[in-house]
Image (cartoon, coloured by chain):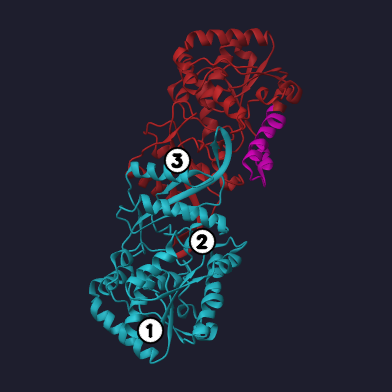
Chain colours: A red, B cyan
Amino acid sequence: MAIKEIKTSKLDPEQFIADKVEEIRATVGDGLAINALSGGVDSSVVTMLGHRALGERLKTYFIDNGIMREGEPQLVVQIFAALGVHVELVDAQDEFFAALKGVTDPEQKREAITQTFYKDVFGRLVRESGAKFLLQGTILTDVDETVAGIKRQHNVFEQLGIDPQEAFGYKILEPLVQIRKDGVRKVGAALGLPESVFNRMPFPGPALSARVIGEATPERIAIARTANAIVEDVLAGVKAFQYMAILHEDRVTGTRDGKRDFGLQIEVRCWNSVDARKAKPTRLPWKTLRGLSARILAEVPGVVSVTYNIAPKPPSTMEVV
Amino acid sequence: MAIKEIKTSKLDPEQFIADKVEEIRATVGDGLAINALSGGVDSSVVTMLGHRALGERLKTYFIDNGIMREGEPQLVVQIFAALGVHVELVDAQDEFFAALKGVTDPEQKREAITQTFYKDVFGRLVRESGAKFLLQGTILTDVDETVAGIKRQHNVFEQLGIDPQEAFGYKILEPLVQIRKDGVRKVGAALGLPESVFNRMPFPGPALSARVIGEATPERIAIARTANAIVEDVLAGVKAFQYMAILHEDRVTGTRDGKRDFGLQIEVRCWNSVDARKAKPTRLPWKTLRGLSARILAEVPGVVSVTYNIAPKPPSTMEVV
């Protein structure tokens, strides 16, 4: 099925919302729908569209997979409560870490998270809810990159020739699949989402496991979480599309208290981009880079080296894994 | 044996040269001495001191271990020929790569190079030459770092409690052991070495194998060699203590021709330092960083990501391995 792109410059957010609300109502009828909210802008916009279309007949879950940013689950539930949308928080940390144990290959990590999410945790919630419709925040860039084989997004089944009804037992609705990130933001604003949500920095589906090269153990995720919190704090005022900290698997030589210490390296990336298809490293002030390095070295245990990405996408990608 | 430091500010290069020439003559008597020249400032200064003291009774070898910088062996032989010093070029690439095969641990890499150098290649040259004295370019910083256990320099035996006479069959003279890098440069200038030699950027004993995280295969060394040549070319005009390119072992996601490509990452380090004990990353212009990244991505096969080091020493070290 060819997807007809709606260019952001031609996007009328109010009309888009009206069309999608109508489509969702027509498809779901008087049935039940369900969706998982990650707190990112895409799933937040889908949640609002779905609630506008279906009200209480859309059940929204936030699944705490253990690889979220600091304080993320509680924050997301609070933001949506303030918008009148109830989000059910589900603690599934142990299930995800069990699935990630020993897995080092990037594709296998994504696959472990996808399988745990759909087949185990979310699949169980869907079966218990009796919902036959699933709303997802897939955008056109996800489809492009999945088709190109660059990355496998967790929410693009049709394009891969997988029938979700057959594979997982439900029908997937993807109301954002004709637009890109900047279009999603325009729709989010029109839906009345707070700017902190619709202008929110993109965060990958595999969450912090995409910020860890190699195995995503609870300990390594905790290191990546602390480093990402520092980067988000230091760069909060910077105009950029996305910034992140990556924990490398390579060990590098360092010194602590005058003794050799094979330590960890954190890589910082800060991207300028419009729609994530192309991106350039942000020219940060030297003082900011020094401050980032000083805080990461002081506050993240075991780290002896910090780098800043200077390669564009392509040939790099935004996330490392 | 406690070493008495001669501070650079108190160093009289002419007096130092006279003292050391006298010491070398007194120790070697009418015997034969031998030394290995790496082309670095330390071994270059020792070569000049030794030739001033002993003339033809010092045999100087340049051992091509296969992990040198681009064009290095030929360049060094030429420079010393112009100074009236004959340097014998020895091709030992196969022996070194055989010893490095399968070795990934940084200490074991150094050890493999040390053993191949002393026991096999240089040991053989010493035995064949009949020389009983070996001149080495150990400086005080090497001793400090070896004693502290930060790094194991290949030329510090006494401090580690190893008797080179017993272990390798010869006596080692270290005329530079009381001074540091900036002192060595002053002595080099006074000895009439061209500025390109005595102001030469430091290069590690384990050469390009220190610029490769993980196994130092001929292929990986070739990648590091190309990347280092680009960094030296682009940063040639920059006032810095040392700059380098490091090939990481971690694979990172990238794209080539629209398809995913798990690729290589090169880290660039450029240090400001006086004596290598402490060092800070150099604040390079953004345009320079962009130029570095563009050339490395275009010219080094398989590279999809480039970073710039922003951590100081300590807790980092200058070299990564």
Q: Are marks 2 and 1 on the same chain?
A: yes
In the image, B115 versus A131, the foreground residue is B115
Q: Examine the image and state in which quarter residue B271 appears.
A: bottom left
Q: Which residue is mark 1?
A: B56
Q: Which residue is mark 3?
A: A311
- Cα distance in 3D space between marks 3 and 1: 52 Å
- Cα distance in 3D space between marks 2 and 1: 33 Å
Does residue A13 show up?
yes
Circle 1 marks a residue in which chain? B
In the image, A167 versus A126, the foreground residue is A167
Amino acid type indicated by mark 1: Glu
Query: Residues in magenta?
Result: A93-122
Tell me, yes or no, whether the two marked residues, 2 and 1, touch with CB atoms within 8 Å: no
Q: Of circles 3 and 1, which is in front?
A: 1
Q: At 52% across and 14% down in the image, what residue appears?
A: A6
- Nearer the N terminus, badge 2 or badge 1? 1
Amino acid type indicated by mark 2: Ser
The image quadrant where one finds the N terminus of chain B is bottom left
- Cα distance in 3D space between marks 3 and 2: 24 Å
Q: Position of residue A146 (x, y in %)?
A: 61, 29
